[in-house]
Amino acid sequence: MRAVVYDKPFSITVKEVEKPKILHPDDIVVKVTTSCICGSDLHMYEGRTAAEAGIIFGHENMGIVDEVGSGVTLLKKGDRVVMPFNVGCGRCLNCEEGNSAFCTLVNPGSAGGYVAMGPFAGGQAEYLRVPFADFNALLLPPGTDHEEDFVLLADIFPTGWHGVQLSGFRPGESIAVFGAGPVGLLAAYSAVLRGASEVYVVDRVPERLAKAKEMRCTPIDFGASDPVEQILELRGGSVARYLV
Ligand SMILES: [Zn+2]
Ligand SMILES: [Zn+2]
């Protein structure tokens, strides 16, 4: 199959590699239909990580289940699924307590495992092996609708949502999001969905600020003046909760 393979900093190649197989009864193999390019790919591409030559890029993946291991109970061939970028076993103490990014089983000697960054191949490829598939593959409605929306569940939307969670936000409060890239915009959108009274989105790229406005947020251009002063002025001096 073809895959996007990292060679060395500033060098990646689409090349023929071996198609992944079921290696464990809890695995599935997915035929990839959509895989995103993330800012984190640039960290690897630019040589800012410990990524080793030969790793397949792509940690935001969705597709159709193609092969199913004998231990998988919740999925079947033909199901449409999206995979979060971090891999957990679903069974260790950390996973059971909801801290699956610190799974103690999937990456021996370390805590947590990441698609395309930990010990697992990525999905900028024709096929992807998903370990502990009942835990790591989210079943989607059948069909081909909303492909570009559902793939955001692999990283960007839950990452933005979780950022709002970590800020300590409570419904009814106001919040400021600094940085309106895809994660920042979806953090702002998460705050809207969670009942924020005002959401201030700070950036200086006009298209990003326009998108924030479309989402009923208040755009703040930090290129114009101090963004904190702008927000304080809009609020008559009272603070919002800040999310960086
Ligand atoms: Zn990502
Ligand atoms: Zn675990």
Image (cartoon, grey):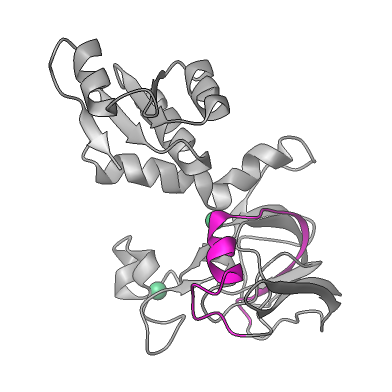
Q: Which of the image's four quarters has the N terminus?
A: bottom right
In the rendered view, tell whether residue 215 sits above or below residue 112.
above
**Which residue lies most toward the front here?**
224
Percent from the top left, x then y, of residue 69?
69, 76
* Lateral position of residue 186 relative to residue 33, left or right: left
Q: Quadrant of residue 12?
A: bottom right
> Magenta stretch?
25-52
Residue at the spot x=69%, y=84% of the render?
54
In the rendered view, tell whether residue 225 sits above or below residue 141.
above
In the rendered view, tell whether residue 23 sits above or below residue 183.
below
Q: Quadrant of residue 224?
A: top left
Q: Nearer the viewer, residue 2 or 81?
A: 2
Q: Which of the image's four quarters has the C terminus?
A: top left
**Which residue lies most toward the bottom here?**
109
Q: Nearer the viewer, residue 78 or 61?
A: 61
Is 48 covered by the magenta stretch? yes
